[in-house]
Amino acid sequence: MDSHAPTIEVPLPPKELQREPLLLNKRPLGWISDQIACIVEGRTPKWWWIAFVPSFIIMCIGGAMLAYQVGTGVGVWGLMVPVAWAWDITNFVWWIGIGHAGTLISAILCLLRQRWRTSINRAAEAMTIFAVICAGIFPMFHIGRVWLGWWLLPIPNANGIWPQFRSPLLWDVFAVSTYFTVSLLFWYMGMIPDLATIRDRAKTKLRQIAYGIAALGWTGSNRHWWNYEKAYLLLAGLSTPLVLSVHSIVSFDFAVSQVPGWHTTIFPPYFVAGAIFSGFGMVLTLVLPLRVVCGLQDVITVRHVELMCKVLLATGSIVGYAYGMEFFIAWYGGNPYELYAFQNRAFGPYWWAYWAMITCNVISPHFFWSKRLRTNMWFVFAISIVVNIGMWFERFVIIVTSLHRDYMPSNWGYFIPTWVDIWTYIGTIGLFMTLFLLFVRFLPLCNIAEVKVVSEHGDPHHKLGGATGGHH
Amino acid sequence: MKTIPPPCPEPESGQKYWRSLDQLAETPEFRRWLEREFPQGASEFADPVSRRSFVKLMSASFALAGVGILGGGCRRPEEKILPFGKSVEGYIHGVPQYFATAMPTRGGAVPLIVRSNDGRPTKIEGNPDHPDSNGATDAWTQASLLSLYDPDRAQRFAQKGNTISKESALDALATLGAAWANPAQSARTAFVLEQSSSPSRQRLVTMLQLKFRDAKWVVYEPLDLQAWRRVTGAAPYYKLDGAKAILALDCDFIGTEADAHRLIRGFAKGRRIEKATDSMNRLYAVEGLMTLTGMNADHRLRVATSQIVAVAAAIAAKIAPGNAEVTALAAKLPLPAHVKAEWIAECANDLAANRGASLVLAGHRQPAAVHVIANLLNTALENNGKTVLFANVPETRSTSTLAELATALRAGQIDNLVILGGNPAYNAPADVKWADAQAKAKEVIRLGAYEDETFAASAQTTLQLPQAHYLESWGDATTSDGTVVSVQPLIAPLFDGLTELEVLARLGGLPTTKPYEIVRETFRATAAGANNFEESWKKFLHDGYAAGAKPGDKAPTLPTGDITSAFAAVAPVTLSKDSLEVVFHRDSRMDDGRWNNNGWLQEFPDPVTKVTWDGLILISRRTAEALGVKNTTTSKTTTDLVKVTVQVGGESKSITGPVWITPGMADNSLGIALGYGRKKGGTGRIGQNVGLYNAYDIRASDTMGFATGAKLEKTGERYELAVTQEHGAMEGRPIIREANKAQYEKFPKFANNFDLEAHMDFVPKYEKPEDGPVGRPKGIYEHPYEAYSKRKSMNGVNLEGKHLKSEIHAWGMAVDLNQCVGCGACVLACQAENNVPIVGKDQVTRNREMHWMRIDRYFSGAGDKLDEMIDDPQAVHQPMMCQHCENAPCESVCPVNATVHDEEGLNVMAYNRCVGTRYCSNNCPYKVRRFNFLDYNRRSLDQLKGPFYSSPMVGGTDKEWTLKRWWKNPDTGIRPQDEWDILKLVKNPDVTVRMRGVMEKCTFCVQRIEQAKISQKVKAGQSGDVRVPDGVIKPACQQVCPAEAITFGNQLDPQSKVSQLQKSERSYEVLGFLETRPRVTYLARIRNPNPKMPDYREIPISVQEYIGPKDHPKNLNPLEPHGAHAPAKGGGAGAEKKGAH
């Protein structure tokens, strides 16, 4: 090094403008690998069993409910005419909405170079995939003759009968299955380097083989990395429109119909915003306990949580705006049936669902204007659950209250769920938790490789990352 | 070789019994055919023995074959069909046959044509050729078909509790009859019969009365619908179509009086208007319960049932002021406080102004005095011979009352009891204590359709004989105009039942015991004078009636003593919340309890309350408020259980039942339905435990119509009810459009002024009918079918001449709301024709009833105050079924193409393709699609009660694990084999029996359309004239409609009746602004109130609701010219027209 060259001191920005590091306590690279991989490698912790056993039992109850429903008829649910869709589609839309955050975090935030995504994207993607699995159960099982559900697929057949391409339900089939496939690929591909890490650290033959197969022969060579980065970017680009399309198309189920309260053009953006809102709510619900029990407070930091809270605040405000705009249009549009549908939402027999939705979705995110509340983990956790309850109610309000009183007063009705409805829904939560816990136990729940990139040690410009203060 | 089309017997329409067109035409073919007398396969008529064996063969083959094709549903059926060894002459497999018969009712009969598919009667229709019928029937007649196939009917011959063979039962009958015929024993013998208009029964009874000289004869009916006859001694025969002003004194002639189907027709005829200037009748109703008659009345006066006599007397005193007795009665009975003298006076004036064209009717519940007054009024108004005639209908007279017989039984004076039909142990007045009395008899012979309460009352002494259903019996009856009709069997008795005629003949030891012979013998008297008895007999059976009866016009003169005693019997009644009146009414579904085990009727919504599967305690809103009881309908429909206590013969008796606040009920009055509260052992699986109370428990011999002095107290419990329409208000929506006659005359096009866009002058509208409905805003997009038909080719396929729309047929329907009275017969006709299953009470509470057709009933409240609204509402009815929209919202959302449009404009459901997403139902603005949630066709009768639905995974059927059983034969579901075997016989083989998970809906009876098209094709042959003539196709609802409110036909035929009606200025589309373009259109309803009446309203209340609160600047009156029909522009400010709230 040229000792004559003057040392260029770049003064640090003032304290309040300094970005908080994404990995706290200047953790070294080895610590990252150890800390994340040890969840997979270590003994099964007690908390895992405490969470897993009830989840598994609930999942089995849900399975029994579905078996009962298929064996007996959809009538075991509380559905009826006029409310021919109720908890089934409510749950479907709710789960699909939750499934939005994962791909948004990994794809859109990747394209937007939001480096904070790396700590949470893996768990969020896993959440996405499991949520879409849970979501898929409902449209599949809500139909009257489950065993003929494959008729919705465009399979060439001797009768020459095709599905009806004008039906939004068919669009759903395409949208959801595409979303699921791409998300799964994205998730798996992003996991390959980490699977290789675990393979390399494996102490038993079984693990070596299992993770070895899963790692697809990853060696970490420059060429591998180069291909990986390209593919990752391509998939991110591919997923980005999907994030917007899935929920837009799900919203067409309603918007394309002519039920007052469904037939509105605002639905696609409103649904997407709501989906991101609920997705981030669910990410927070999952990640907040995880970072504690897995000792990942330095990886998933308060700053991460705060950033997610800001997303909640933004999307929650969009959702609130949409609620208001719906009412405005109902009044301004001058269609008495539509006006009635909205009045009925707020003041009809299901007023409680509407006001539960407003409380949870419109009011609760506004607490996050306060930094003190954003950084209070217990508070954030509580709000994240409230958000998910609110978003469930939103779908319930849209579906059930619109249907229960539409055009013909003679046929108005009141939907009441049965215990099968309730347990099927809870059962999917059990399925989701079961899958998620298995994921936590057997797969790296944070992106080891990418977290290293955003760490100070991994930053070549940072002192810890090798920079010694000058150009190199 | 050229395929020769199968022979198509004349006439070649789908419904070949409609020979009326030919008859009118008097074509040579028809003459030839008439001479042949019995066109197809009816040679068996001449010889009952071969007919029976044919029918037996058919039923046997079905029992063996398992009728896979019927039960197949959406699954591939397992076919086990035994071929005929030898074909039956004239029988074409799969082609239904039609036979004339009649359903006997209490004092009359309903003449019928019954369809038989392969030996099974599958649909009952009215006999249109009968001089006094238009082919209409009522709901009970429609549902009687299901009772034929009731697996809970009495099936065994039993003596002293043991099952015996039919032969020994008949021997026992003969032995007992012979033993009782001597004078000593005959004095200890009593016969209990039901009312009957059968000349044969009357003949046999007369013969037996000679044989059993001193026997007591009791004709007992819990509901004596012939009350007027009791007073005047003659059977009145009303001609309502000739009446311009009608006064109904507690007479529900549209609903629950005898012969309603016929009276509705007369009434509706009198209301039929084609132009605004046509005249129509005016109905005044004075009643305590809210009934269909009151709902259809132009003026309805709400008076407690026990006080109606006062109103009747007051009106009579106005019309016949010279009659001293009437004036004295009117003076004796004070009018209830809320009755305005003007009402009485103007009503009387209107009746008097229509002298000779008016009619006063008195209800069967009312005491003799009201019947006497009605008779006096009709005489004073010169109606006799014009709107009231008197027919010769045979009647068996009692020699003793049931109460006297019970006393004699208790005194040990009677040992031998013959009970033919009826169920006195259940429905006798409570003070008679019949069941105890009956148990005193040493020998009881009982002919009963069920092993019911009467059987149970003396099971150890009874010779129980199963009674044959009328579709299994030979018999005869007389309709109310005096025409004798034949009752012919369509099927051999399923359970070997006997008819009343056979039992009487065997008991009397008569030489002829075969009912066929008995009827034939009786007919000799009717046919006396005919040249050829054999020919007239054949004609009688074939036509179903013997023409020629002429009701007389001479009113019988009432003996003065009777009038005096009748008037003396009434006294002023004061009612209060502590001394209520209890009205025992004929239930619109159970009748007096006889239809208790009929699932179709149990699930048939009451036309007024829309409640199913329950008997209610009807109460007015004010009284409910005073007594602190309420019912809620917002979420679950629940109501207070109340205890009603009445003094019966000095004892305090009570019943507990659900209370139901009914708009329009008189205050301090309780309506209590007969026919419920039956328990296991009394009735079958459907009827047991339906309804909480048995009204007969509090009904005494002297209070058969109504009782006073009742008390009501809350029990504190709540009870859930199954209601098919929870919301009774139209919410100001223009779904049913109506106007008063005066406005209609001024603004004939008012109906279309209710349209949402009628006031939007700035929106471009369709101008030519071929583009779209004239006056409707232009669509932005071209109609896809039209766009398609304009294309020359698509995907390389030449489309020239291949139109998606047929150029021959476009099916449409017009429903005249001015005709419809809301009786609901169409609902049951549709159920029978289209294999619509029942779902049970639990499922109805969950809004899962399956009726393809419903009658929407809306109340609209008068006045601005809620109080007034509920007290004296106006009501409207609307039959609602699939509207067969040309732009059907259901079609575009079905992901599997299961609901599609056919080229003739039907919105068709491919059940096989349906996977059950229910999206179509959500998107249907009319909510007329029905979803089979729980495999209702295969659920056992026990399962109807819910709420846990057994799954094939757990639980057993026929002592086998259901899943295993299902695996072996997926067709039977969880129905026990015995139920399944018999209940499947009722199905119409031309209509798929839908499985679970499939959406279903009205098809316009596509099977009838197709049959008619096929036979028209066969008929057309080379001529190519394949257009089905107008009037040939009648869907089940149109066929049954007594009011002739429904018209179906071809819209492409400008001469067809439906095209004419749809061009009417009253014609409108429901929710037409959605651009669904329904093929079903409605004709607006017209009210005809009397401007001089104190309760006159210038516009109907529903229109006031639509307009909204008065003085609202934006609200436009649709009954004023504006918009498209206005001479000058205006109304732009009213663009966002109020329609809901």
Image: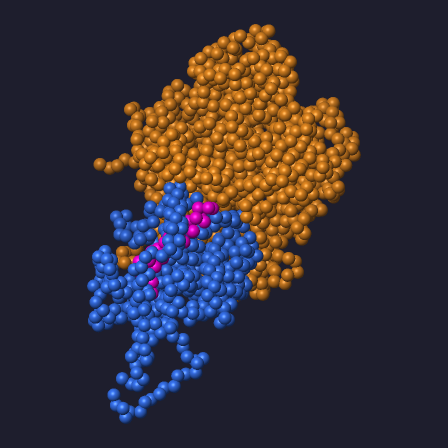
Chain colours: A blue, B orange
**Residue at (52% x, 65% y) in the render:** A363
Q: In this view, does A194 lie to the left or right of A348?
A: left
Closer to the camera, B326 or B1016? B326
Pinpoint residue B358: horizontal percent, then vertical percent. 65, 37
Instruction: From this view, report whether residue B335 is shown above or below residue B63.
Output: below
Closer to the camera, B1024 or B296? B296
**Residue at (38% x, 30% y) in the render:** B958
Q: State the residue lying farthest toward the bottom.
A: A4
Q: Can residue B512 be seen in this view?
A: no
B591 inside magenta stretch: no
Q: Main secondary structure of the magenta part?
A: helix
Q: What stretch is highlighted in magenta?
A: A418-446
**Residue at (33% x, 63% y) in the render:** A445
Pinpoint residue B847: horizontal percent, then vertical percent. 49, 44
A433 inside magenta stretch: yes
Instruction: From this view, report whether residue A418 is shown above or below residue B201.
Output: below
